[in-house]
Image (cartoon, grey):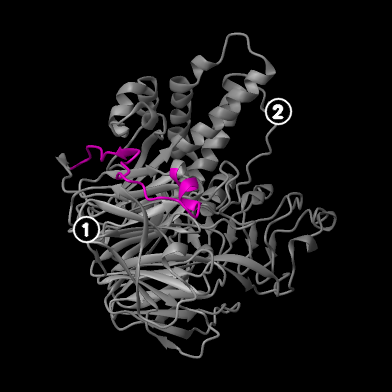
């Protein structure tokens, strides 16, 4: 027994352990181990207890081939995928975390392996066999091997979505064996570093048996609902003309056509269903935000350079989705809640051995007026803030102060909270710093990029407002400082309009959508708002730079978003389409002090049409796009609808 000794991985000296040739039982519980060294040997080890450590990977356990009983409970970074890995790697394993896994392990080793081998072979035959010439060079082998391994891990899926990380691990293993033995392609030609398999991409709180027996429950990803197969995508690429007609708008000019982004549908997910019902096409989806990348962390994938994980909310649940694979990585449910908004922050937390580590925290809020705080990597909702007595429409974190959270509520107030930093036992203290009084319900909020600690904008049911949020002022409850006027339908300036879309395109240009049909305004913050102006509740005319042509619908709550790095604006409509505006040709002119307003409305660069989806052979109709968001690099476009479908498009 080496329990409760504060042991770290470096304390397990292989020179010592390799001499323990007849050791059969080893207890390493209640230590600080984050992995096992690869060369402990221990050829006769039968029972191993690793409970209450910080293990992130189980693959090194394959060095103990006679292991029969294994426990590693309360290692927060291990998931159901790791359970399946040890079942595959340890042929003699009978008990895992106290449960008899003999029957399930046999299924994993035999039936699952046969299925995956068949799929891997079919993927090679369909997409790659013809790419390999009869006589090939070492460089050609390296290239095709790299492409095949990436493609097969992305496109070969099998079993429940909560096990996709295990599936990807097995697929890579099978693909490498296939290349080596079936085709004679030497595995040693790989010049790329091997992808680490301890990257917790697919975490779940379910047991292995639950995951195997109840496919419908895992993650709620009913990928059988709509499938866009790789073969179809490949065929569409070869017929670029027909694909363009489906995925792109009819461009008005050749110049505009040249700006078109090639976008293809990757996944259509029905993962927010009430009670996991396949028949739920009524749950409204409202908000999605891409997870920020940590400098280092379990979710960082070497294949991509930016985060591909998005948090979505709607109905009683919040989901974490891998946009590339369509995998629902995690799902958080509150039966009595309807979630309207989610937001990320990164907190530097002190873990148990006094080391500091960055962790992503997700805030989720909705109808109950309560903010839930979720430590995603640990699968743990560690606290809640009873922020308002009425529903919360939207939340956002300060970009400069990671613990400062704004909540905008139907009580016609916007509150600023300091959520604090949880200690290693998740104790935290939240405090209210400010209350901003609005005259109507705030629907969208945005901090001014050049001064995020001083000014906040809100699009409300009764207009667009600005507040001074500087904390050196004593006044805790504050009225708005300015209300903005916009042209009404008769052309006259008015403050009376509902603003249900609001975002910054860059440091100065604001994009807002009001109830005036068919119109999205772009306007200048610095030229509209005089920070030196005296007094509160001033009426200010927005200095409008341009209007974007949009749908003629008068429906509310179809909000917009921006991708500042690419100068793009996105807005969905009442027909399931996404209107995309590339504005890089305009932003330079707008930034000059004498920049003039564009005379004509700017048409969309392209419109992504909603594809024909069928559920139970019935075509889905009346699809509203409530929200559409791109990742910071404009690689993925996530579309949230009124029919419980999350659509994910990929650009190229």
* Frontmost residue, 281 versus 44: 281
Residue 377 lies, in percent from the top left, at: 53, 63
Residue 285 lies, in percent from the top left, at: 29, 58
Q: Which residue is mark 2?
A: 188
Q: Is residue 611 magenta?
A: yes
Whether residue 434 appears in this view of the structure is yes
Numbered mark located on residue 212 in the image: none
Cβ atoms under marks 1 and 2 closer than 8 Å? no
Q: Which residue is mark 1?
A: 491
* Frontmost residue, 260 versus 309: 260
Q: Residue at (22%, 37%) from the top-left corner?
A: 612
* Frontmost residue, 359 versus 205: 359
Whether residue 333 appears in this view of the structure is no
Q: Which residues are magenta?
A: 586-615
- Locate residue 211 relative to residue 588 in the image: left or right: left
Write down the quadrant of residue 274 in the picture.
bottom left
Residue that extends furthest to the top in the rendered view of this protein: 134
């Amino acid at each position: 027994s080496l329990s409760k000794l504060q042991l770290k991985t470096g304390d397990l000296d292989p020179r010592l352990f390799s001499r323990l040739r007849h050791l059969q039982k080893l207890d390493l519980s209640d230590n600080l181990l984050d992995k096992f060294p690869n060369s402990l040997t221990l050829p006769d080890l039968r029972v191993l207890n690793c409970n209450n450590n910080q293990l992130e990977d189980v693959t090194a356990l394959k060095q103990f081939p006679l292991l029969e009983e294994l426990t590693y409970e309360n290692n927060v970074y291990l998931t159901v995928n790791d359970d399946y890995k040890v079942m595959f790697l340890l042929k003699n394993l009978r008990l895992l975390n106290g449960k008899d896994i003999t029957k399930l392990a046999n299924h994993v080793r035999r039936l699952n392996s046969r299925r995956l081998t068949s799929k891997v072979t079919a993927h090679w035959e369909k997409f790659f066999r013809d790419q390999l010439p009869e006589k090939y060079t070492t460089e050609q082998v390296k290239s095709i091997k790299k492409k095949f391994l990436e493609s097969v891990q992305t496109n070969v899926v099998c079993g429940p979505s909560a096990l996709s990380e295990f599936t990807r691990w097995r697929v890579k293993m099978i693909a490498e064996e296939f290349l080596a033995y079936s085709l004679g392609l030497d595995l040693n030609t790989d010049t790329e570093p091997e992808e680490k398999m301890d990257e917790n991409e697919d975490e779940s709180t379910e047991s292995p048996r639950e995951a195997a027996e109840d496919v419908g429950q895992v993650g709620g990803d009913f990928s059988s609902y709509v499938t866009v197969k790789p073969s179809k995508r490949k065929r569409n690429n070869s017929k670029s003309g027909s694909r363009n007609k489906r995925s792109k708008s009819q461009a008005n000019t050749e110049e505009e056509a040249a700006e078109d982004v090639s976008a293809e549908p990757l996944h259509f997910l029905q993962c927010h269903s009430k009670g996991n019902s396949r028949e739920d096409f009524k749950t409204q989806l409202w908000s999605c935000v891409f997870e920020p990348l940590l400098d280092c962390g379990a979710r960082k994938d070497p294949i991509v350079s930016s985060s591909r994980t998005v948090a979505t909310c709607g109905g009683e649940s919040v989901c974490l989705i891998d946009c590339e694979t369509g995998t629902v990585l995690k799902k958080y449910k509150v039966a009595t809640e309807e979630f309207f908004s989610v937001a990320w922050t990164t907190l530097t937390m002190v873990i148990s051995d006094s080391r500091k580590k960055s962790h992503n925290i997700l805030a989720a809020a909705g109808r109950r007026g309560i903010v839930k705080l979720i430590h995603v990597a640990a699968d743990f909702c560690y606290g809640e803030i009873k922020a308002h007595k009425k529903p919360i429409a939207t939340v956002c974190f300060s970009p400069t102060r990671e613990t400062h959270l704004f909540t905008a509520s139907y009580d016609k107030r916007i509150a600023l909270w300091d959520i604090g930093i949880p200690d290693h036992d998740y104790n935290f203290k939240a405090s209210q710093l400010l209350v901003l009084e609005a005259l109507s319900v705030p629907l969208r909020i945005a901090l001014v990029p050049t001064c995020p600690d001083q000014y906040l904008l809100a699009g409300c049911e009764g207009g667009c407002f600005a507040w001074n949020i500087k904390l050196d002022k004593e006044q805790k409850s504050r009225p708005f400082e300015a209300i903005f006027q916009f042209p009404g339908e008769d052309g006259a300036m008015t403050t009376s309009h509902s603003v249900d879309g609001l975002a910054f395109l860059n440091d100065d240009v604001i994009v807002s959508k009001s109830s005036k049909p068919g119109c999205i305004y772009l306007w200048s913050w610095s030229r509209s708002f005089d920070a030196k102006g005296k007094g509160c509740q001033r009426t200010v005319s927005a200095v409008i730079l341009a209007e974007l042509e949009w749908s003629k619908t008068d429906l509310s709550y179809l909000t917009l978003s921006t991708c500042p790095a690419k100068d793009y604006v996105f807005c969905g409509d009442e027909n399931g389409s996404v209107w995309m505006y590339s504005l890089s040709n305009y932003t330079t002119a707008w930034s000059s002090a004498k920049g003039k307003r564009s005379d004509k409305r700017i048409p969309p660069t392209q419109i992504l049409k909603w594809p024909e989806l069928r559920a139970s052979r019935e075509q889905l109709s009346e699809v509203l796009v409530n929200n559409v968001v791109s990742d910071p690099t404009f690689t993925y476009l996530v579309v949230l609808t009124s029919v419980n479908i999350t659509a994910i498009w990929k650009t190229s």
